Amino acid sequence: MSELLQVQGISKRFGALQAIELLSFSLNEGEIVGLIGPNGAGKTTAINLISGVMRPDRGRVFFGAEDVTGMSPHVLVNRGLVRTFQATTVYQDQTVRENVLRGAYAKAYPGLAKSLWRGPQGISRHDEAVIDDLLAQLGLAEMAQLTARNLPYGHQKVLGLAIALAAQPRLMMLDEPAAGLAHDEVVHIESFIRRANASGISVLVVDHNMRFISTLCQRVVVLHHGSELATGTPQEVTRDQRVIEAYLGTSHEPA
């Protein structure tokens, strides 16, 4: 199994705060890897550094065989590295289907202005059929013509996932995809992530729901104060005394 993502000794400081300190980990083709840790551990900062939202102060990020350190997010999307955000990030005044088309535009037209403003003529009939199938699989087909702002919170989270998938990623990085969702919605998200992974998409997922992470991920990287505390299978990290003391607690239920 070949390495798809390599994070090599990245660091990031914000004033007096050392948010990330010499963080290294890897993700293989076809893997689902979890990134967990207490609040303030640096999980979202790590995702921001990998996805080009921020540039690390030191260290390198490799995607495939290419050094992509500090590349702009839209350039990384064109290479197949796509991320979602903690907050629902959708085009609120556009329909559900138009939102998903934007994901396809971002892949087909990596320039920021083109990805935002390209009209429907920029997408092939095949791509449109793929998008319609994606909406159906995610349970959004009947809502396709609704304005995104009118969707319930859970459906907006699902829509964010659909936008990411429309960009045809090789690696999809999900920042708290299950946050704020009801149990049935979490099960739905988990099922679709598994199907996306089975189709060949690798996944890096940040979440506080340890049951979700444990059932979904093959490996887990635990952050503490911006550094790697432990890496292993979900079973290994939940038994690691350092992880229990720093994060899980005796109940194995993170706050």
Image: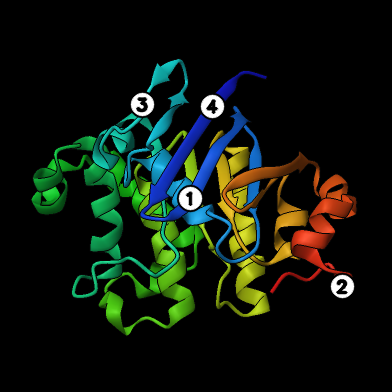
Q: How far apart, in angstroms, are the residues tagged by discs 4 and 2?
A: 32 Å
Q: Residues within 10 Å of mark 3 (few under 14, many from 20)?
A: some
Q: Are marks 3 and 2 in contact (CB under 8 Å)?
A: no
Q: How far apart, in angstroms, are the residues tagged by discs 2 and 1?
A: 29 Å
Q: Residues within 10 Å of mark 4 (few under 14, many from 20)?
A: many
Report helix, strand or loop for mark 1. Answer: strand
- Callout 4, which amino acid? Gln
Q: Residues within 10 Å of mark 1 (few under 14, many from 20)?
A: some
Residue pointed to by mark 1? 18
Q: Quadrant of residue 229?
A: top right
Residue pointed to by mark 4? 6
Q: Does 160 sit left or right of 203 as displayed? A: left
Which is in the foreground here, disc 2 or disc 1?
1
- Quarter holding the N terminus is top right
Q: Earlier in the sequence, mark 2 or mark 1?
A: 1
Residue pointed to by mark 3? 68
Q: Earlier in the sequence, mark 1 or mark 3?
A: 1
Residue pointed to by mark 2? 251
Q: Earlier in the sequence, mark 3 or mark 2?
A: 3
- Callout 3, which amino acid? Val
Residue drawn at x 28%, y 32% as measured from the top left? 71
Report helix, strand or loop for mark 3. Answer: loop
- Callout 1, which amino acid? Gln
Q: Quadrant of residue 230?
A: top right
Residue 181 screen position, x and y as percent: 57, 77
Residue 232 screen position, x and y as percent: 79, 39
Q: Does 26 sit left or right of 127 as displayed? A: right
